[in-house]
C-alpha cells in the first residue's frame, strides 16, 4: 500500500466522520473508521519493523505521528493546505526482503521501498538469469530486487538522470554489495544530447519531496537541471551487451522517446514493463510496440503495462 497523506486523507474521508454529517450517519461510519485506524496501526508497525537502528525506528514513529496530525487538522478545516508525504524527520536506513536501502529525510524515498509498494507488479520482475535494464532506477528498488536475484547469472544496467537520486542509488548498491550492476547517470532518449530535467521545489507543491517525480516533460513552475541523454541502442553497443531479457521503463511521460532510441533492442524481443499515465501517449506506445510484434496487457496495478512477444512454436 502506498503511504502518503493523500491516501491517508482519502481513507479518512471514506471511513471517518466528515464535518456536518448527522449523528446517525456518524455511527454507521464508526466501524469503518475503526477498521481504518487498525489498518494504519498495522502499516505503522510494518514500516517501523523495517528500520535497522532504534534511532531510525523512533524517527519513523514520530514522523508518522506528526503526519497523522497534519492530515487530521486539514480534514477538520484547521489547516489551510493539505500535508504532503515528505515528512520523514531524518535520514533512515531500512531493510526489507529486497535488500538494504538508505532513504533521505523529508522525501518519499522510504515510501518507494515499503514491502507493499507496487506489490501488484512484483511477479513481473522474476528474472533469474540474463540482462535487466532499469530505466528510471530512482534509488534502486527494482535494481536491487533483480540484481540480488540474478547474482552471477546476469547483469543489471540502471539509468538514473537525477544526480541526487543517482548518489543514493550508488549508496544503496554499495550497501547491498552488488557487483553485477552498471550505473549510468544519464537519461534515455530518442537521440544523443542534453535535456532539461525538471523537479518540484516549491514547499507548497504536493510533489515537492517526491523524489520519483523528476521528468524531462516541461513543468513551468519547477526548477530544472541539464542532464546527459543517449539512446538505449547506443549505450548497449558501447557496453558490448548483445541481448536484453527484461526492461523496466518509469520515466514520467518520456516512454515514447525511450522506445524511439531502442529500435535495435526491441528486435531482440525483451519483455518490457512500463508505466503510462497518459491515454494519448499510451496509444502511441501500442502502435510502436505493436509494429515490433509485441502484445500488451494491463497489469493489476492500473498505471503499469506488460509488453511481450509470444513464443513461436
Image: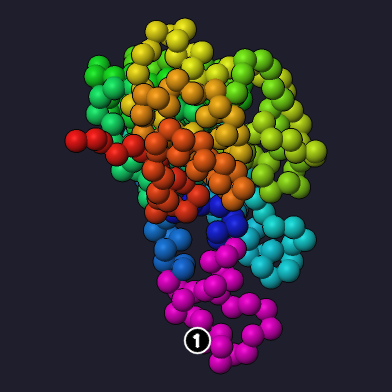
Where does the magenta region start and end? 9-35
Residue at x 41%, y 45% (from the top left corner): 296
Count of numbered marks = 1
Q: Is residue 290 left or right of residue 154?
A: right
In x, y percent, where is residue 17? 59, 78
Which quarter of the rendering shows the C terminus? top left
Residue projecting furthest to the left: 313
Label 1 residue SS = helix
Q: Is residue 14 left or right of residue 266?
A: right
Can residue 31 be seen at all in this image of the molecule? yes
The image quarter containing residue 34 is bottom left
In x, y percent, where is residue 200? 71, 38
Please, is residue 280 above or below residue 240 in the view?
Answer: below
Residue at x 36%, y 38% (from the top left corner): 308
Query: Is disc 1 surrounded by few (<14), some (14 to 19) or many (20+) residues within 10 Å?
Result: some
Nearer to us in this view, 59 or 25: 25
Residue at x 67%, y 79% (from the top left corner): 19
Which quarter of the rendering shows the N terminus? bottom left
In x, y percent, where is residue 150? 27, 24
Magenta residue check for 274 = no
Residue projecting furthest to the bottom: 24
Q: Which residue is mark 1?
A: 28
Residue projecting furthest to the right: 220
In x, y percent, where is residue 174? 41, 18
Q: Most prominent secondary structure in the magenta stretch?
A: helix
Can residue 115 be seen at all in this image of the molecule? no
Residue at x 68%, y 17% (from the top left corner): 194
Q: Is residue 102 left or right of residue 155?
A: right
Nearer to us in this view, 71 or 211: 211
Amino acid at each position: 500500500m502506498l503511504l502518503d497523506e493523500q491516501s491517508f486523507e482519502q481513507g479518512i474521508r471514506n471511513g471517518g466522520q466528515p464535518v456536518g454529517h448527522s449523528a446517525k450517519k456518524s455511527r454507521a461510519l464508526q466501524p469503518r473508521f475503526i477498521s481504518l485506524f487498525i489498518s494504519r496501526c498495522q502499516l505503522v508497525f510494518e514500516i517501523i519493523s523495517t528500520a535497522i537502528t532504534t534511532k531510525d525506528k523512533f524517527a519513523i514513529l514520530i514522523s508518522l505521528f506528526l503526519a497523522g496530525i497534519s492530515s487530521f487538522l486539514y480534514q477538520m478545516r484547521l489547516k489551510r493546505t493539505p500535508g504532503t508525504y515528505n515528512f520523514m524527520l531524518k535520514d533512515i536506513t531500512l531493510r526489507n526482503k529486497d535488500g538494504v536501502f538508505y532513504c533521505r529525510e523529508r522525501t518519499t524515498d522510504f515510501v518507494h521501498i515499503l514491502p507493499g509498494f507496487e506489490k501488484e507488479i512484483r511477479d513481473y520482475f522474476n528474472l533469474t538469469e540474463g540482462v535487466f535494464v532499469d530505466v528510471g532506477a530512482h534509488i534502486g528498488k527494482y535494481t536491487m530486487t533483480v540484481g540480488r536475484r540474478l547474482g552471477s547469472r546476469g547483469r543489471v544496467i540502471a539509468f538514473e538522470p537525477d544526480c541526487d537520486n543517482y548518489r543514493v542509488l550508488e549508496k544503496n548498491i554499495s550497501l547491498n554489495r552488488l557487483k553485477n550492476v552498471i550505473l549510468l547517470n544519464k537519461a534515455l532518449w530518442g537521440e544523443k544530447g542534453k535535456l532539461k530535467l525538471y523537479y518540484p521545489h516549491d514547499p507548497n507543491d504536493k510533489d515537492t519531496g517526491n523524489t520519483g517525480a523528476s521528468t524531462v516533460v516541461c513543468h513551468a513552475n519547477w526548477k530544472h537541471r541539464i542532464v546527459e541523454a543517449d539512446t538505449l541502442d547506443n549505450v548497449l553497443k558501447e557496453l558490448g551487451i548483445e541481448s536484453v531479457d527484461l526492461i523496466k521503463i518509469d520515466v514520467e511521460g518520456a516512454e515514447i522517446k525511450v522506445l524511439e532510441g531502442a529500435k535495435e533492442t526491441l528486435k531482440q524481443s525483451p519483455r518490457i514493463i512500463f508505466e503510462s499515465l497518459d491515454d494519448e501517449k499510451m496509444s502511441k506506445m501500442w502502435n510502436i510496440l505493436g509494429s515490433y510484434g509485441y502484445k500488451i496487457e494491463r497489469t493489476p496495478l492500473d498505471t503499469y503495462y506488460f509488453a511481450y512477444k509470444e513464443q513461436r512454436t
